Image: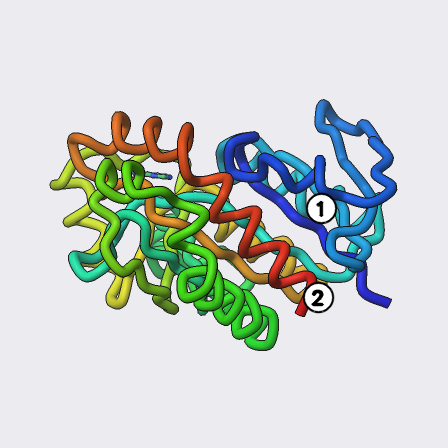
Amino acid sequence: NVRLGIISALHEEQEGLVEAMQGPATLIHGMRNYASGQVAGIDAVCVLSRIGKVAAAMTATTLVEKYGVTHILFTGVAGAGDAGVKVGDIVVAESLVQYDMDASPLFPRFEVPLTGLSHFQSDLHMSQRIASAATDFLDKDFETVIDDAERAEFALERPRVHRGLIASGDQFISKRAHLAQLTGSLPGLLAVEMEGAAVAQVCFELGIPFAVIRTISDNANEEAATDFMRFVKSVASRYAFHIVTRFCAD
Ligand code: ADE
């Protein structure tokens, strides 16, 4: 019996989903509201983690241990980690790394001590399904859901879905040099954010299948803060709502 935990860091990344839930009930624990009900016929619990790895780890753990979810989906925005990944594109994680983990020389850089792992794999089946929901959204709903003015504002031309490496850390990346340093040490990096790899570690340790999907809000450069604010305020929630609803309905 599937019970899906849906996490976003911020309200704007999950807006509309709780309102669209059938039979929602709110449970409060550890300063967060867990909304439980059905999304497109699937038992689900929606929650906002707030920002950062500890917040995300706490939220994922609570979803599993207290609210009995069997699967976790994280949806939100991220900074682009590669020149081929544009604002408005979607990145589905194949694996996730905590880029600020460094216990060297005791353990290799990025390795989470005593797990033997630096890269945590997402669930292939869930990731395939969320990627195809994202592709369907872009192919079928995008033109009606995001209007001409918005497409012009964010220069959204033919957004694409990418799959690969996402890196998480407790830093908002807003300097080109900082991003360059990360891309230099993490081959295949597609996006940077602040929660995904923490959820990945928790799910690995608890044996819970999970997926992470991120819409690119900025280029993790000097303009990142302004771009992020504008993107999150306007189109981020519609991406998430339509993709997650399609994912649950399929
Ligand atoms: N989430 C969205 N944009 C980000 C950035 N530039 N750095 C970290 N997390 C982000």
Q: Secondary structure at mark 2?
A: loop
Q: Secondary structure at mark 1?
A: helix
Q: Quadrant of residue 224?
A: top left
Of callouts 2 and 1, the N-terminal one: 1
If the image is split into quadrants, where does the N terminus sit? bottom right
State the mark number for residue 182.
Answer: none
Question: What is the C-alpha distance between the residues marked 2 and 1?
Answer: 11 Å
**Residue drawn at (57%, 41%) of the image:** 8
Q: Which amino acid type is shown beneath numbered disc 2?
A: Gly
Q: Which amino acid type is shown beneath numbered disc 1?
A: Thr
Q: Is residue 48 left or right of residue 127?
A: right
Image spot of residue 40 (x, y percent): 74, 56
Image spot of residue 97 (x, y percent): 41, 57
Question: As displayed, is residue 145 above or below residue 84?
Answer: above
Residue with the most extreme left position: 177
Marks 2,1: beta carbons within 8 A: no
Dot 1 corresponds to which residue?
A: 61
Looking at the picture, tell me which residue is in the foreground, 237 or 36.
237
